[in-house]
Amino acid sequence: MPRVLVIEDDLVVARSIKTQLEKNGHSVALAEDGEAGLTLALSEYFDVIALDRMLPKLDGLSIIGRLRERSIPIPVLVVSALSDVDERIAGLRAGGDDYLVKPFSHQELAARIEALVRRSPAAARREATLRAGTIEIDLLDRKASLEGKLLRLPDMEFRLLEFLVRNAGRVVGRRVIFEQVWGHYFDPGPNLINVHIGRLRKKMETPSRSAVIATVKGEGYRLELS
């Protein structure tokens, strides 16, 4: 569930934003002034910040500046009653990712938040992570783990496990594996795949047998999860 930090000193507006975002499946934290908002932004993880420009204690653009100084790339939607073009430009040049003028439609705000969530580092990370049972594969860092323990896999075994995870529970034929993992459009014989499957099985052996590569006679292999 995406987490949104709303920094808004008008409690009526803040609560209405919170209600709308929660209806759209977001988890929302509120901060009523700039200092409290910055503290939350620095101490907890959020996918997006919805930020009022004119806040007590610390203004919105200063908050963005503090975040960017620390190389925190969290997307920020600036929400403000300042509607002039110059003000919008100032908000974006300060490091804001979008700018919404008050009064606004709550549906529009939710749509803009969702667009920023899709661009967040966390969203990119989620899309780059495959999970099946107790197996987790990080496609960006090229790491795989089973039951929380890192599997040390050379490139071909990593690709083979990734393919099996993408097709967990289904029988995948040898020909398809050769095409999708090795890029071979001919059968190089049984030894090649047998060797890699055997090595992968050995590395995945655990007392709980939470993930097993089963041989389906005459058909291929199936990743079975418990």
Image (cartoon, grey):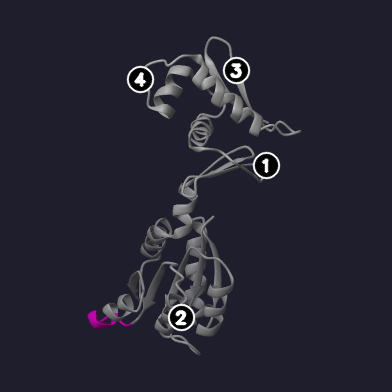
Q: Which residues are magenta?
A: 82-87
Q: Which mark is residue 104?
A: none
Residue 64 forms part of the magenta stretch? no
Which residue lies under the disc numbered 1?
147
Mark found first going from the N terminus, 1 or 3: 1
Q: Which mark is residue 215?
A: 3
Query: In front: 192, or 218?
Result: 192
Q: Residue 45's image quarter?
A: bottom right
Residue 17 point in image, percent of width and height: 47, 69
Mark found first going from the N terminus, 4 or 1: 1
Which residue lies under the disc numbered 4?
185
Residue 50 sits above or below residue 35 on the image:
above
* Comparing labels 1 and 2, the label whose residue is closer to the camera: 1
Mark found first going from the N terminus, 2 or 4: 2
What is the crowding at mark 1: few (fewer than 14 residues within 10 Å), some, or many (at least 20)?
Answer: some
What is the crowding at mark 3: few (fewer than 14 residues within 10 Å), some, or many (at least 20)?
Answer: some
Give amino acid for label 3: Thr
Q: Which residue is drawn at the image coordinates 56% and 38% (left, top)?
A: 153
* Comparing labels 2 and 4, the label whose residue is closer to the camera: 4
What is the crowding at mark 4: few (fewer than 14 residues within 10 Å), some, or many (at least 20)?
Answer: few
**Does dot 4 land on a helix, a strand or a loop?**
loop
Residue 207 sits above or below residue 171 on the image:
below
Query: In front: 87, or 47?
Result: 47
Residue 52 point in image, percent of width and height: 42, 79
Question: In the visual, does 136 lie left or right of 148?
Answer: left
Which residue lies under the disc numbered 2?
66
Give amino acid for label 1: Glu
Give amino acid for label 2: Arg
Query: In front: 152, or 57?
Result: 152
